[in-house]
Amino acid sequence: MASILHLMPDLEPDEMGYIQTLVNPMNEDEARQFASIYRSRRREPMLLLVTTIVGFFGVAGIQRFLTGQIGMGLLYFFTGGLCLIGTIIDLINHKRLAYEYNVKQADQVIMMMRHGR
């Protein structure tokens, strides 16, 4: 059983709990491989916060592009963050946006590791 805390100490608490359940059945080498791939794919909540703030002063929707939500990113871009209302909501929920994106990435990494890609 590998501890995710020593592999990725910078995770948010809820993210750490989720990732730990994925890593528990892994041996140390598998956990390190997972951590290496996952770290390169995950998004920091602070990055989403900063890019959301940029939406107030310039280009709205960057945070949505970073989380793979291209359609929403385009919608935000062309509507000024849905007249800033969507941008304000994303500002409040930036940690949830990061968590949801990161969970998807973790699941993809697990599937990739199981299928040997």
Image (cartoon, rainbow, N blue to C red):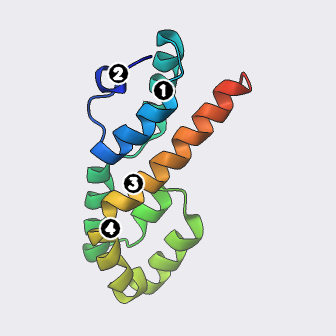
In front: 14, or 79? Answer: 14
Please name the residue shown 40% across and 52% down the image.
99
Q: Residue under circle 3?
A: 98
Question: Is residue 101 shown above or below 25?
Answer: below
Amino acid type, callout 4: Asn
Residue 102 in the image: x percent, y percent? 46, 46
N-term mark: 3 or 2: 2
Question: Is residue 111 shown above or below 51?
Answer: above
User: Secondary structure under badge 1?
Assistant: helix
Q: Residue under circle 2?
A: 7
Question: Is residue 111 shown above or below 47?
Answer: above
Please indicate whether residue 108 sits to the left or right of residue 27 in the image: right
CB-based contact (under 8 Å), mark 4 and mark 1:
no
Q: Return the residue found at the far bottom.
A: 83
N-term mark: 1 or 3: 1
Q: Whole-Å distance between the Cαs marked 1 and 2?
A: 10 Å
Q: Quadrant of residue 113?
A: top right
Q: Return the residue found at the far right.
A: 115
N-term mark: 4 or 2: 2
Q: Residue under circle 4?
A: 93
Depth check, mark 1 against mark 3: the one in front is 1
Please indicate whether residue 85 sits to the left or right of residue 108 in the image: left
Please indicate whether residue 41 sits to the left or right of residue 46 in the image: right
Please name the residue shown 25% across and 74% down the image.
57
Residue 61 in the image: x percent, y percent? 42, 70
Numbered circle sitting on residue 52: none
Q: Residue under circle 1?
A: 23
Q: Whole-Å distance between the Cαs marked 4 and 2?
A: 26 Å
